[in-house]
Image (spheres, grey):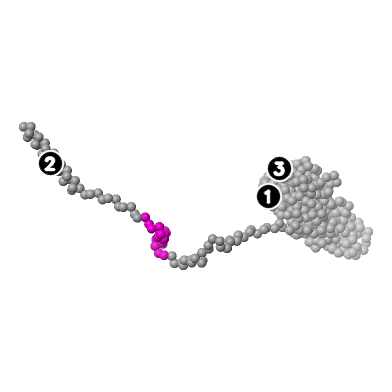
């Protein structure tokens, strides 16, 4: 029995072994991995780069030959130096002596309205009340002012009565004398820039917007340089973006240094620094250009007073010049009153006098403020700011 069982077990084992062998032979063999690619021949030329489909066709442009290729050691590449920007040449301003005489033709409009108008009326054979009223109207139209007009007409009536017969030459001389009396010939009209006990002289320029104040400050620098003075400019108009640039340009033309601060900065600080720089540099004059204050803006006018107080921590102001537009007429007198309340005005600068028929404003503004007209602007040119000379002015008004 045991022999039979053993034989069965052996048979089962043999059959199992044969079955596994048959199954193994029927399975598909797994393919072997491909052999690694052959390394390229290092002597072969590199392949052309392929960038998209365009690289499949050869390039049409010709290839450069060896002679056309820049080899090391070839001609050096020349690098052009940037052009040297030269500083603007310093100008020599026109002398100020007699400048008003040379600009006499610019007063032609005022001459026709005031001087020639008066001479025509006074030359009438009969000077009745209607004629004298026309004389008054002519003076008032020329912005002479009410009180000065009344004074002038009264004196003219008396002198004409005494004179009797009136030749054109006699009338011209008579009118010249009376106008000179109104304007004043014994007033000191020099711009104070040379204090006896110190340097520099300090001049502050004030005025409302639109009167040409910054331009006048630049032209005044030219006047001073023409008279042999050295100048520092203080750009204390920090509220108008172009004001400091404009003033600096004026200064560079005559070799004057400009002190400026940040836009919308403190004007008093700029003015203080300008005087400090002027002292350290040893210049003769410091000109301070202030912002164009609208006379109705109380806060701005207070700030102008602050600028004056801060500057005077260095030294007293020698001049405060008020710039007025001659074409504004009586409105300029309103401006003058307000400025005079804030700072002590010491002189008047009348601009655009060549563009108005109202030359009488010279008389009116002096009477209103009690200070003299010291400078007049008679054009757009750089040297068209002239020291005011009463004789030359009156001669221009009434003609030869």
| Magenta part of the chain | 39-58
Give coordinates of residue 119: x percent, y percent.
85, 62
Q: Which residue is mark 1?
A: 240
Query: Mark 1: which secondary structure?
Result: loop
Numbered mark located on residue 15 in the image: 2
Q: Earlier in the sequence, mark 3 or mark 1?
A: 1
Q: CA distance from mark 3 to mark 2?
A: 121 Å
Give coordinates of residue 219: x percent, y percent.
76, 55
Q: Quadrant of residue 303?
A: top right
Q: Earlier in the sequence, mark 3 or mark 2?
A: 2
Q: Residue at x 71, y 51 (%)?
A: 209
Q: Is residue 51 magenta?
A: yes
Residue 330 visible in the shown view? no
Q: CA distance from mark 3 to mark 1?
A: 17 Å
Give coordinates of residue 88: x percent, y percent.
72, 57
Please say if 28 is above or below 104. above
Numbered mark located on residue 299 in the image: 3
Give coordinates of residue 126: x percent, y percent.
88, 63
Q: Residue at x 16, y 46 (%)?
A: 22
- Overall secondary structure of the magenta stretch? loop
Q: Residue at x 69, y 52 (%)?
A: 245
């Amino acid at each position: 029995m045991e022999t039979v069982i053993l034989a069965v077990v052996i048979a089962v084992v043999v059959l199992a072994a044969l079955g596994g062998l048959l199954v193994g032979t029927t399975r598909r063999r797994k393919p072997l991995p491909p052999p690694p690619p052959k390394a390229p021949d290092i002597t072969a030329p590199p392949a052309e780069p392929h960038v998209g489909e365009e690289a499949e066709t050869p390039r049409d442009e010709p290839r450069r030959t060896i002679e056309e290729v820049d080899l090391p050691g070839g001609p050096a590449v020349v690098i052009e130096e940037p052009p040297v920007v030269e500083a603007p040449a310093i100008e020599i301003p026109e002398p100020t002596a007699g400048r008003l005489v040379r600009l006499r033709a610019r007063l032609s409009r005022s001459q026709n309205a005031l001087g020639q108008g008066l001479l025509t009326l006074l030359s009438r054979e009969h000077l009745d009340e209607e004629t004298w009223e026309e004389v008054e109207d002519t003076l008032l139209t020329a912005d002479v002012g009410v009180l000065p007009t009344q004074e002038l007409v009264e004196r003219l009536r008396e002198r004409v009565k005494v004179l009797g017969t009136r030749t054109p030459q006699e009338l011209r001389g008579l009118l010249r004398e009376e106008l000179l009396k109104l304007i004043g010939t014994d007033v000191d009209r020099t711009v104070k820039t040379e204090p006896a006990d110190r340097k520099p002289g300090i001049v502050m320029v004030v005025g409302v917007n639109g009167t040409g104040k910054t331009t006048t400050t630049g032209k005044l620098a030219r006047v001073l340089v023409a008279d042999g003075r050295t100048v520092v400019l203080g750009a204390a108009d920090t509220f108008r973006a172009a004001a400091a640039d404009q003033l600096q340009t004026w200064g560079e033309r005559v070799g004057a240094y400009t002190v400026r601060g940040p836009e919308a900065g403190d004007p008093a600080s700029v003015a203080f620094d300008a005087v400090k720089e002027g002292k350290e540099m040893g210049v003769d004059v410091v000109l301070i250009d202030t912002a164009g204050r609208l006379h109705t803006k109380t806060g701005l006018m207070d700030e102008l007073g602050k600028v004056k107080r801060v500057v005077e921590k260095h030294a007293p102001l020698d001049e405060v010049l008020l710039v007025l537009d001659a074409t504004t007429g009586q409105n300029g007198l309103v401006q003058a009153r307000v400025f005079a309340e804030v700072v002590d005005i010491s002189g008047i600068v009348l601009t655009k006098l060549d563009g108005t028929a109202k030359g009488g404003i010279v008389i009116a503004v002096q009477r209103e403020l009690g200070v003299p007209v010291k400078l007049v602007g008679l054009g757009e040119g750089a040297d068209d700011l002239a020291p005011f000379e009463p004789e030359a002015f009156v001669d221009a008004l009434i003609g030869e």
